[in-house]
Image: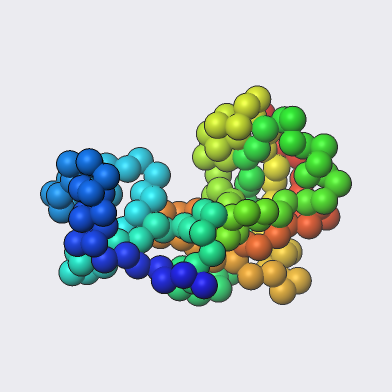
Amino acid sequence: MQKTWVDVTLLIENLREKGKRVDLKLLKQIVDTDNKNRFSFDESFEKIRANQGHSVKMDLGYKVQQPPGTLYHGTAKKLVGSILKSGLDKRNRNHVHLSLDIESALKVGKRHGDPYVFKVLAAQMFKDDFDFYLSKNGVWLTDKVPKKYLNHINV
């Protein structure tokens, strides 16, 4: 499993070697203005990390938390059939990403095509021993959502 944090000086040096004009000030601006809050610094600004490790296997240091009763998952309508057969699976990501509200899930779904939103019975999953984590940017994470915990939302 890979390390969670990257040395900022090393990152800047590697980016400069690739012809990118980056310094700590610009990196801070990128982190501060990213509308999805994808990245964070440690307290010293010497290390940086992704708040969710999408496709790179890593220990993000999240602790199991009890989720709210209901969460939502946005996807494309073209994927609904396969989701109804097997549930939501993390596939090549570290976790399945879930939203706290329908509007956020709808935005996620729109990125993949004609949007569709599933309601996830998170409290029942937690009661049935599924682990949930809350990322720094407010996205709920879990390893899998079996189809029995999914309900349809008409949006």
Say whether residue 147 is left or right of residue 119.
right
Picture coordinates of residue 148 (x, y %)?
A: 83, 55
Q: Report the residue at 78% width, 57% height from top.
A: 146
Q: Report the residue at 26% width, 54% height from top.
A: 14
Q: How is the structure coloured here? A: rainbow
Total count of labels: 0
Residue 78 is at least partly visible in this image: yes
Q: Report the residue at 52% width, 40% height from top.
A: 104
Say whether residue 32 is left or right of residue 97.
left
Tell me the quarter of the picture where residue 111 sits.
Answer: top right
Q: Nearer the viewer, residue 25 or 16?
A: 16
Residue positioned most to the front: 17
Eyeballing the image, is 124 above or below 120?
below
Eyeballing the image, is 135 above or below 109?
below
Picture coordinates of residue 35 (x, y %)?
A: 35, 41
Picture coordinates of residue 6 (x, y %)?
A: 32, 65
Q: Nearer the viewer, residue 122 or 69?
A: 122
Residue 67 is at least partly visible in this image: no
Say whether residue 3 is left or right of residue 69.
left
Tell me the quarter of the picture where residue 131 sits.
Answer: bottom right
* Quadrant in the picture for the C terminus: top right
Picture coordinates of residue 152 (x, y %)?
A: 76, 39
Tell me the quarter of the picture where residue 82 sits.
Answer: top right
